[in-house]
Image (cartoon, rainbow, N blue to C red):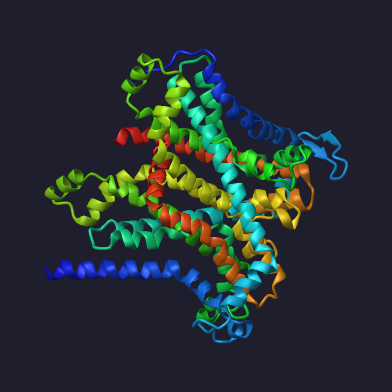
Amino acid sequence: MRQTKNKIMGIHLLLIMSVLIISLPVILALIISTQTEAQVMSYPPGLIPGTNMVNNYIAAWNGVNLGRMIINSTIIAFGVIFGKVTMSLLAAFAFTHFEFKGRNFLFGAILVTLLLPVPVRIVALFDVIRSMHWIDTYAGLIIPFWASATSIFILIQRFKTVPSELIDASKMDGCTPMQYFFKVLLPLTRSTIGALVVINFIYIWNQYLWPLMATNSKEMRVVQVGIKMLMSTESTNNWGVIMAGVIITMIPPLFVFVVMQESFMKGFALQSEK
Amino acid sequence: MKQSTFDNKYLPYILLIPTFFILVVFLFYPAIETFRLSFFKIHPWTGAEKFAGFYNFVKIFTNRDYLRSFILSAFFALIVIAAGLFLSLLIALLLNQKIKGMRFYRSLLIWPYALSPAIAGALFNFLFNPANGVLCYFTGFRTWLTNGNTAIIVVIIAAVWKNLGYNIIFYLTSLRNVPGAALESASIDGAGSVKKFIYITFAFLSPTTFFLFVMNTIYAYFASFGLIDVLTEGGPSGSTKILIYYLYKDFFVHSKIGYAAAESLVLFSLVVGVTALQFRTAGKKVHYQ
């Protein structure tokens, strides 16, 4: 009995230690984001909250026009999610509810895209976007991400679990395929769609390489690139302002993550089953 | 069980048109075009093309900097994967114990997943900055980021930290699926708990481990770009310049389009390699269950 008690205490201790170590960088960033430049520069480093929190957050917000970048990242995230989920739903519906010539070939073509992450095709993708005059536009940051093998696979998995009787019954009632899609299938898929929205929001919000290359003007920059801009505009020692910018930037995905955690975990479980 | 289907000759194609339009324009064409460009010399300003055979490949693979970047990337990926999977398995095992507050701990341990590599770069840039970085102070060593040998260590720590949450989620999910019956029958046979863990748990975890191996390889090779751009910009003097950063510089900064295309192809073969591995293990997964 005593032994198990000690064991449980030990596990709690180890877990608390892990939590502290994992949280440390962000806790420190929170503290630093409240300090004045002088407080930040004190040596040894002062690890207590400072007196400049409001000013730092305002400076970070105004310094590189973070507000505009947050709007950009939000528009891009929702633009990608809307197109990606819509198109993946339609594609998954086609693959699971119809028999047609070339089905396997087309499915194979989608499978192949798993081999083609952005860096592998970036040289010519950049040319395509440039020749479309899509540099510095939302279109250039949104539309190339609309097709997704992973989302299609996850939806196919989900659609396969819908009982066949529902299709037969709908057919008997004289439902057209699209009526069945909207009235029967979509309502049953709501939680999977939720999971896809969460995963993709975090994924798109956190993208870096493509938005860096596909935008030039300050007006079109996204938050992730903004972090680096903030670091080069602020004097190198003004970590208070930089960390304030970092905290602002991490809030939206963290918020989505915390609020939707269950749906998020579910989405992950689906991903590993693919 | 075979699923019932609708009879409609044209509808499935119509449903697939949007996806395939995007695939052709933004995936297949750019991939094939990049492949083609890797065999051409391209003028940086006029864009004039001249067939050059394997010139670009010979050039990059006889460049010491590129070879160094190639080895550095493999080293970086290997350490990030090994350390990342080991630590996350350890934490997942702790989380899998039946104790109070498990869900609470879980949330507190996986949230860095929601942060971006660029954010991780900014955080660790501060922690290790030479002027007053907290970790410089506590380690009594100021030149973590200005010394090539130690800068890569900082990049590795940041990359592992950032991806722990992701790995923990997957290990935790598959630990839940280890059948209690198998563990029980093992303990009746008198297997010690260490042996029990190694033989049974590990057998069940191996598909997840392979999956995570692939995902972490892709992460280390590609997604760490933002982290490195914010943390070290590939420096000091190229000591953290992994292949993706090298490609970005050659293409975007130096306009060496042919080289960049060839470098893309090198990365492509890497993706093909690890994906093939994943498919082989996906086959194994069927055997286990």
In front: A203, or B126?
A203
> Is B98 placed left or right of A237 in the picture?
left
Residue B169 in picture, x, y percent from top left: 39, 52
User: Percent position (x, y) of residue A14?
Assistant: 32, 68
Res. B155 visible in picture = no
**In the rendered image of this protein, does residue B173 appear above or below residue B284?**
below
The quarter in which the C terminus of chain B is drawn is top left
Is residue A202 visible to us here?
Answer: yes
Q: How many numbered discs, if any?
A: 0
Residue B243 position, x and y percent, is 64, 51
Q: On the picture, is B64 further left or further right than A203?
A: right
Residue B141, percent from left and from top: 56, 79
Q: Is residue A245 left or right of residue B182?
A: right
Quarter of the rendering containing residue B268: top right
A58 vs A228: above or below: below
The residue located at (49%, 32%) in the rendering is A89
User: Hey, which residue is sitting farthest right in the picture?
Assistant: B46
> Which one is nearer the viewer's eye here, A150 or B19?
B19
Q: Quadrant of residue A143?
A: top right
Q: Report the side of A264 relative to B24 (left or right).
A: left
Closer-to-camera residue (B85/B57): B85
Relative to A128, is B18 above or below? above
Residue in the picture at 30% in, 36% down:
B288
Which residue appears at 68% of the width and 61% of the height?
Answer: B238
Image quadrant occupied by the N terminus of chain B: top left
Q: Residue furthest front?
A: A173
